Amino acid sequence: MSQVNAQLNLAPITQLLTDSIASIGQLGQNAGFIIIRNDTIIYQQYWGTWNNNTYQPIASGSKLPSMALLMKLIDEGYLSPTDTVQNYLPSFSGKPIMTLHQLMSHTSGLPEQSSYISDNSITLEQAVNNIGTSTPMTTYAPGTAFQYGGVSMHVAGRMAEIATGTRWDTLFQQKIGIALGLSNTDYVALGNTTNFRIAGGMGTTMPDFAKVVNMLLKYGKHNNNQIVDSLTVKMMQSDQTNGVPLIGTPYSGDSLRQNFRYGYGVWLEEETNGQITQFGSQGAFGFTPWIDRCRNIVCVLFVRKNVSSIQPTHTELRNLIEQLIPIKLEKPIITANGNQLQSSYQQGNQWYFNDTLLQGETNQIITPTQNGNYAVKYISPEGCEVFSDEFNYAVTSVEFVGSQSEISIYPNPAPNLFKVNTHRDSPSTIEVYDITGRKIQYKSFSKNTSIDISEQSKGVYFIRVNIDNLTYITKVIKQ
């Protein structure tokens, strides 16, 4: 991954984090922050004694790489979201049927925590068997409520071991770690154990974890190699809770975050035009990675502090980045073609007139009906959006298209009545606009008709005739 001096002014980020280090830094001094865009590090800074080799536990930040591994195993056919726990784990035979999907989306009905997942003296196999026999379910049946925690993913991790015949830590290295070149990432940050804490036991460095989130930003690619299938990544980053009640979320009482929905291993943090555009996997120790698809960036706030201590700075940092780093989309360009306006994008358009949305105008080309400022918003398949510059349009600037001998309008000037004749039998339409671009009359005709504007005041008007592929706009004067 390359590192360059960004052409953006990101100095305010340094100022914000420096000013906040007493609140967010370990021992009031240690922290790190990185931003990657297009495989390029555009910002990287450490405070205190931390550096690229600093290894820290990341608590629930572990859920994102753990889920990447589980999704990789789904890609390869070892597992399926519809697999039942009971099919792999006889110790769960006395519990309601639950699926791998429900484990991964925290809708399994299992509780948030169990002492077995933090017991370093036993194996993952022993811990999960004990959960099956001795950890009670919640009062919510599988698939009926969201209860965030570590127990569900612990069970999912053991299913992965059974399906592959490989221990979890080895499996992660084989499928994810080696492929991404993770040199200092493992699942023993909370103690040397083989009871790997799938949802919260990872330790890592800032550069290592940045590779993981950057791979997911790129829909599973790293160095042109497809590590996780792109469709599988999209599954991870879509709502997998099916609208069930959020009965257990670490963000309860946080007005900005308490309604976040969950995918597989990531919180769905921002929605734009019906698409999720920002994702995160924050941990209890304050470690905060996120993906911003509209800006095409990944960020990792590398801290070790109670999450409530860093949240005000985290919120301010996110807002600042959205101000400093523009959305990574080419701005649409509007061009005039005869009496029509055209967007540079074939699809994803929404037109506006004088800052007001034009209902139904979503094609690449529109035919303006009024003088004024037109703009078009482009909406990408990911839901990101960017506006064009305004295009000032005047009816008088529209040129005649076709042969003028096809149509005649007379007399001109006239006191009230204008006659319109054509040499074609094709059905035609005629529109009349006043000088402001307001449409005052519309009618259909064939070959010839009359336009009566006796109820209008004296002055200049515009008549537009549409016949086959011919459009004719001319200025008339009412005497």
Image (tube, grey):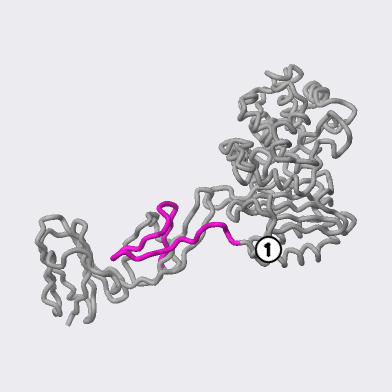
Badge 1: few (under 14), some or many (20 or more) residues near its Cα, within 10 Å? Answer: some
Disc 1 target residue: 320
Q: Is residue 35 magenta?
A: no
> Could you tell whether 400 is left or right of 69 in the image?
left
Residue at image x 10%, y 56%?
425
* Residue 292 versus residue 355 in the image, above or below: above
Q: Amino acid at mark 1?
A: Leu
The C terminus lies in quadrant: bottom left
| Secondary structure beneath label 1 | helix
Q: Which quadrant of the figure has residue 82?
A: top right
Bounds of the magenta segment:
326-353
> Could you tell whether 52 is left or right of 261 in the image?
right
* Residue 140 versus residue 403 in the image, above or below: above
**Is 256 or 339 nearer to us in this picture?**
339
Count of number-bearing discs = 1
Q: Is residue 347 magenta?
A: yes
* Residue 332 versus residue 418 in the image, above or below: above
**Is 249 or 413 nearer to us in this picture?**
413
Residue at image x 73%, y 55%?
34
Residue 100 position within the rendered picture, expressed as x and y whole percent measured from the top left: 66, 28
> Could you tell whether 277 is left or right of 16 in the image?
left
Residue at image x 75%, y 45%?
208
Residue 324 position within the rendered picture, expressed as x and y whole percent measured from the top left: 64, 64
* Residue 457 versus residue 209 in the image, above or below: below
Q: Which quadrant of the figure has residue 195?
A: top right
Residue 435 position within the rendered picture, expressed as x and y whole percent measured from the top left: 29, 76
Residue 453 position within the rendered picture, expressed as x and y whole percent measured from the top left: 18, 73
